Image (tube, rainbow, N blue to C red):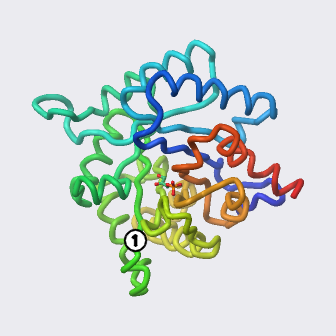
C-alpha cells in the first residue's frame, strides 16, 4: 500500500516542478542552487523522494552544467519534444538534443500544449515513442476540462487520452512511464481536485494500465497529480494510495514552497 504516514511507498515518489515559460537561463541557475542548498540543509533524502524540474529549453544547457559540476542530485527534463529526429521543423527540439543535455524526462501532452498548440492524442503518441527512442522517460499528461468534469464523463475522457497516448508501447517501456493527471480546471486556478478526486482518477488510470499491459507493469508506473498543488495541500494528496507524486506549476517557482512540497513527509510527521 502506498502511504506517506508510515513511510512506506510502493513506488519512489516523484516531486516535479514544471516551470513553464518562467525563469531565464540566469535565473534558473540561481534558483537551482538555492533549491539544492535548501534541501541539503534539510537533509533531504533524494534517494527516497526524487526531485525533478522542467525548465524552458534555453535553460537546459546551464542546468546541465550546474547539475554535473556541483553533482546535484536533482534530475530534469524538457517540457516538450518533436516526434521527429531532425530536419526542417523550425522551432522544434528533438529527443536526441534533450538526451545530450542530460535530460531524464520529457513532458508530453501538457494541457497547455494540447489546447494552445492543438496537439492531438495521435501526435502525442508519436512523441511518447520518440521519447523512448532516445531513452527519455515520458511524463504523459492527461486530464479533463471543466465541462467534461461537470458532465461526469471525466474518467472515460481521461482514460481515452491515456489509451491513445500509450498505444503501441511494450510492457518494458510502459513500466518506466510516468502519467500525470492534471484536470485542466485545476491548473493555475487555485482550484484543487480533492485528494479523493485525485485518488479516484489515479486508481482508474492504474486499473486501465493493468488492462492494457498487465498488473505487475501497472504496479510499477508512477502516477502524479497536478493542479494548484502547494505545500499546504501536497501532503493530503500524496497520502492517497495511487498518487505517487505531484507535478507543480506556480508553486514550483518559489524555492521555499517547492522545497516544502518535496519534504511533504516532514509535514505529515510533525503536523
Ligand atoms: O500545469 C501544472 C503543472 O504542469 C499545474 O500548474 P499549477 O500548479 O500552477 O496549477
Compared across the picture, whether 212 is left or right of 87 comes to right
Q: Residue furthest bottom?
A: 151
Residue 167 or 18: which is nearer the viewer? 18
Vertical placement of residue 213 versus 32, above or below: below
Residue 181 in sight from this viewpoint: no
For image coordinates 43% across by 70% down, the residue present is 211
Q: Quadrant of residue 4?
A: bottom right
Q: Which residue is mark 1?
A: 144
Residue 186 is situated, as x and y percent measured from the top left of the image, at 50, 66
- Outermost residue, left direction? 88
Q: Is residue 254 above or below residue 142?
A: above
- Residue sticking out furthest to the top: 69
Looking at the image, which is closer to me, 17 or 196? Answer: 17
The answer to whether 142 is drawn above or below residue 64 in the figure is below
The residue that appears at 58% across and 23% down in the rendered structure is 30
Q: Is residue 106 visible to us here?
A: yes
| Quadrant assignment for the C terminus | bottom right
Q: Tell me the residue at 59%/49% (across/down).
A: 251
Q: Residue at x 53, y 58 (%)?
A: 226
Q: Position of residue 35 (x, y in %)?
A: 66, 31
Front one among 237 and 178: 237
Query: How would you rate the neighbour count of disc 1 (Cα within 10 Å): few for under 14, some for 14-19, many for 20 or more?
Result: many
Coordinates of residue 11 in the picture (x, y in percent): 64, 52
Amino acid at each position: 500500500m502506498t502511504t506517506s504516514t508510515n513511510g512506506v511507498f510502493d513506488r519512489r515518489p516523484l516531486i516535479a516542478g514544471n516551470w513553464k515559460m518562467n525563469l531565464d537561463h540566469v535565473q534558473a541557475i540561481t534558483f537551482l542552487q538555492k533549491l539544492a542548498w535548501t534541501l541539503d540543509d534539510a537533509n533531504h533524502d533524494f534517494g527516497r523522494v526524487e526531485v525533478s524540474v522542467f525548465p524552458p529549453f534555453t535553460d537546459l544547457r546551464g542546468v546541465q552544467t550546474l547539475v554535473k559540476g556541483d553533482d546535484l542530485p536533482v534530475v530534469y527534463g524538457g517540457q516538450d519534444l518533436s516526434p521527429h529526429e531532425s530536419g526542417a521543423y523550425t522551432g522544434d527540439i528533438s529527443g536526441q538534443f534533450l538526451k545530450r543535455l542530460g535530460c531524464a524526462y520529457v513532458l508530453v501532452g501538457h494541457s497547455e500544449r494540447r489546447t494552445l498548440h492543438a496537439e492531438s492524442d495521435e501526435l502525442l503518441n508519436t512523441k511518447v515513442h520518440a521519447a523512448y527512442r532516445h531513452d527519455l522517460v515520458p511524463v504523459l499528461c492527461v486530464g479533463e476540462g471543466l465541462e467534461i468534469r461537470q458532465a461526469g464523463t471525466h474518467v472515460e475522457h481521461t482514460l481515452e487520452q491515456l489509451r491513445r497516448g500509450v498505444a503501441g508501447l511494450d510492457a518494458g517501456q510502459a513500466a518506466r512511464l510516468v502519467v500525470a493527471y492534471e484536470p485542466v480546471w485545476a491548473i493555475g486556478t487555485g482550484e484543487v481536485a480533492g485528494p479523493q478526486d485525485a485518488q479516484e482518477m489515479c486508481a482508474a488510470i492504474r486499473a486501465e494500465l493493468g488492462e492494457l499491459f498487465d498488473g505487475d507493469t501497472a504496479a510499477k508506473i508512477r502516477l502524479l497529480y497536478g493542479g494548484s498543488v502547494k505545500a499546504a495541500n501536497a501532503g493530503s494528496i500524496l497520502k492517497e494510495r495511487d498518487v505517487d507524486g505531484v507535478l507543480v506549476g506556480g508553486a514550483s517557482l518559489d524555492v521555499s514552497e517547492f522545497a516544502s512540497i518535496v519534504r511533504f513527509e516532514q509535514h505529515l510527521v510533525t503536523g
